[in-house]
């Protein structure tokens, strides 16, 4: 197994560690989750660059890399729903998109074709990861306030909580819009695998 594929597998292995850091309440757990998510996201940038630069692109990597991205992002979004940081409708839309794209990939694979992610899918991933990182930064800032590390009165804290929630929701919905757009483009570009021709 080459280095890019190893990095992809590391990203997948980090997912349960990331979920535990996010859901288990301990001091600075949002920071821990943020750091793990960031490391996992960096492996996403590295594996593709290394694969292209060293000519190590494989069918396995083309299939596994976007799958690892989906697992990481969807894990974060589902956890956000569980902690009240995200609307469940948003996650349903993202899941529908991911299942649709994966179905097209499987249909292509059954005909011996591995379809790599397109530029729209990469933009979708970047916007999702940016939105998720922003939510983590916001939540960690609020955690520092609640711990008394950043002194703010209750009224300002309540106001910031509302404003930050809106900011996080807006960013997550923007990333969801890109997910839908990239999904539609992906299906259109690979419609021959759906039609059965």
Image (cartoon, grey):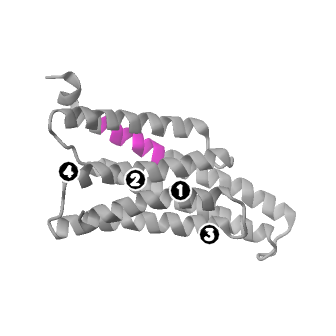
Q: Which residue is mark 2?
A: 69
Query: In the rendered structure, are the residues bearing label 2 and label 3 in contact, judged by CB atoms less than 8 Å apart?
Result: no
Residue 155 pos. (x, y %): 85, 61
Q: Which residue is mark 3?
A: 31
Which of the marked residues, 1 or 2, is nearer the chain's N terminus? 1
Residue at the (24%, 52%) spot, across then down: 60
Residue 179 drawn in magenta? yes
Instruction: Please name which of the two marks, 3 or 1, marks the residue nearer to the observer.
Output: 1
Q: Quadrant location of the C terminus?
A: top left
Which of the marked residues, 1 or 4, is nearer the chain's N terminus? 1
Toward the right, the furthest residue is 154
Residue 78 pos. (x, y %): 57, 45
The residue carrying pointer 4 sits among few (fewer than 14), some (14 to 19) or many (20 or more) residues within 10 Å by Cα, namely few
Q: Which residues are magenta?
A: 175-185
Q: Mark 2: which secondary structure?
A: helix
Q: Is residue 83 above or below residue 54?
A: above
Residue at the (37%, 66%) spot, across then down: 43
- Indicate which disc residue 59 carries: 4
Q: CA distance from mark 3 to mark 1?
A: 16 Å
Which of the marked residues, 3 or 4, is nearer the chain's N terminus? 3
Toward the front, the furthest residue is 1
Q: CA distance from mark 2 to mark 4?
A: 16 Å
Q: Nearer the viewer, residue 136 or 113?
A: 113
Instruction: Please name which of the two marks, 2 or 4, marks the residue nearer to the observer.
Output: 4
Residue at the (66%, 62%) spot, across then down: 139
Q: Which residue is mark 1?
A: 16
Left or right, residue 105 beside residue 56 = right
Which of the marked residues, 2 or 4, is nearer the chain's N terminus? 4
Q: Quadrant location of the N terminus?
A: bottom left
Say if residue 124 shows up in the picture: no
Q: CA distance from mark 1 to mark 4?
A: 25 Å
The quadrant holding residue 101 is: top left
């Amino acid at each position: 197994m080459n280095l890019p594929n190893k990095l992809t597998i590391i990203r997948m292995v980090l997912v349960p560690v990331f979920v535990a850091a996010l859901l288990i309440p301990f001091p600075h757990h949002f920071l821990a989750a943020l750091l793990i998510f960031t490391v996992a996201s960096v492996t996403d940038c590295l594996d593709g660059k290394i694969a292209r630069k060293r000519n190590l692109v494989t069918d396995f990597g083309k299939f596994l890399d976007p799958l690892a991205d989906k697992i990481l992002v969807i894990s974060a979004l589902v956890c956000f729903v569980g902690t009240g940081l995200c609307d469940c409708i948003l996650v349903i839309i993202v899941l529908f998109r991911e299942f649709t794209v994966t179905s097209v990939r499987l249909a292509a694979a059954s005909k011996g074709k591995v379809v790599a992610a397109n530029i729209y899918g990469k933009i979708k991933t970047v916007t999702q990861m940016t939105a998720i990182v922003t939510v983590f930064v916001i939540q960690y800032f609020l955690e520092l306030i609640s711990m008394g590390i950043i002194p703010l009165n209750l009224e300002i804290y309540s106001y910031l909580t509302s404003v930050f929630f809106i900011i996080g929701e807006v960013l997550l919905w923007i990333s969801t819009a890109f997910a839908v757009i990239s999904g539609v483009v992906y299906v259109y570009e690979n419609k021959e695998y759906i039609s059965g021709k």
